[in-house]
Image: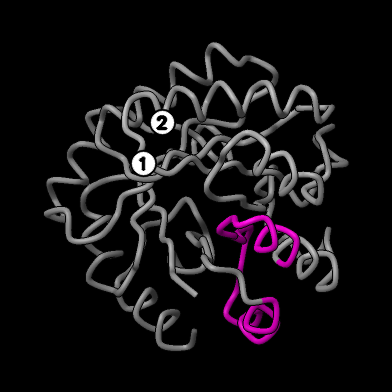
Amino acid sequence: MKLLVSPINTTEAKAALDGGADIVDVKNPKEGSLGANFPWVIRAVIEAIESKKPVSATIGDFNFKPGTASLAALGAAASGADYIKVGLYDIQTTDQAEELLSKVVQSIKGYDSNKFAVAAAYADYRRINSISPLLLPEVGAKVGADVVMIDTGIKDGKSLFEFMSEEELTRFVDDARGLGLTTALAGTIKFEDLDVLRRINPDILGIRGVVCGGDRNDEIRQELVEEFKSKM
C-alpha cells in the first residue's frame, strides 16, 4: 500500500514528504471532503517538495456539472498535479457519473496522457444523495479513469467503516483490480483501522486527520506521518 497524505500548504507538504508520504495530495478542507485548493498552492507545493514525490490535487465535491468539473480538472493538470481527483457528490445515476467522469478524463488526458484521473465516490452516499461506491469500478473503467477511490463526504468524525463493511470494501477493491484500476481508500482512517485495511489491501491509503492529531483542521505533524507509515 502507498500512503497519500493531504496537506493544505507548503509547510504541511514538507512534513508529509519528510514523514514518508508516497503521494502528496493538495486539498482545501474548508471547501469539503475533496475541496479544491488554488493553482498557485499546487505549484508552490510541487516546488517545495522538489518533485521528489507525485503530487495529487483535488478539484471538488461535484454535483452534475461536467463542464465546470472538466475545466477544474484541466486547471489542476496545468498547475502540475500528477493525480487529479474529482468527487461524485450528489451524482444520482450511473449515467450522470459516466458523463461527468468522461469529460474530466478527456480534459486531463487531452492535456497530458501521462497524468492520472481519479474518480471518488463516498462511503456515506446515502446521506449525501449520491451513487453507491460499488458502482464506481465499472463506471471508472468504462470512461478511462486510472484510479477509483472511496472517501467520506461529510467530515464529522465518522469513518468509512461506519458506512461500509469490510466485505463491501474488499468487493470494491477486487472489482476495480479485476478491471485494471488502481484503488484508494480514505475517510477518517485511524491507527486502529490498519489491521482491517491490510486485509482489504487497497493500493493507496489516503489520510489527513489522523496525522493532524485527530482533527483535520489542525496541522499535519511529521512525527505522526512517520508513525503511521511505519505501522502500515
Q: Which residues are magenta?
A: 174-200
Q: Position of residue 200 (x, y in %)?
A: 69, 76
Q: Give yes or no for residue 191 being in the magenta stretch.
A: yes
Q: Nearer the viewer, residue 12 or 119?
A: 119
Give amino acid for label 2: Lys
Residue displayed at 81% across by 51% down: 134
Which mark is drawn over residue 115?
1
Q: What percent of the width, then of the height, locates residue 224?
A: 39, 76
Classify residue 168 by image quadrant.
bottom right
Disc 1 vs disc 2: Cβ atoms closer than 8 Å? yes
State yes or no: residue 159 in magenta: no
Q: Earlier in the sequence, mark 1 or mark 2?
A: 2
In-image side of 221 versus 232 (left or right): left
Splitting the image into 4 quarters, where does residue 36 fall? top left
Residue at the image point whose x is 67% and y is 55% from the top: 179
Q: Amino acid at mark 1?
A: Lys
Q: Determine the secondary structure under disc 2.
A: helix
Q: Position of residue 137 (x, y in %)?
A: 71, 49
Q: Could you tell whether 153 is left or right of 119 in the image?
A: right
Vertical side of 103 occupied by 132: above or below: below
Residue underneath mark 2: 109
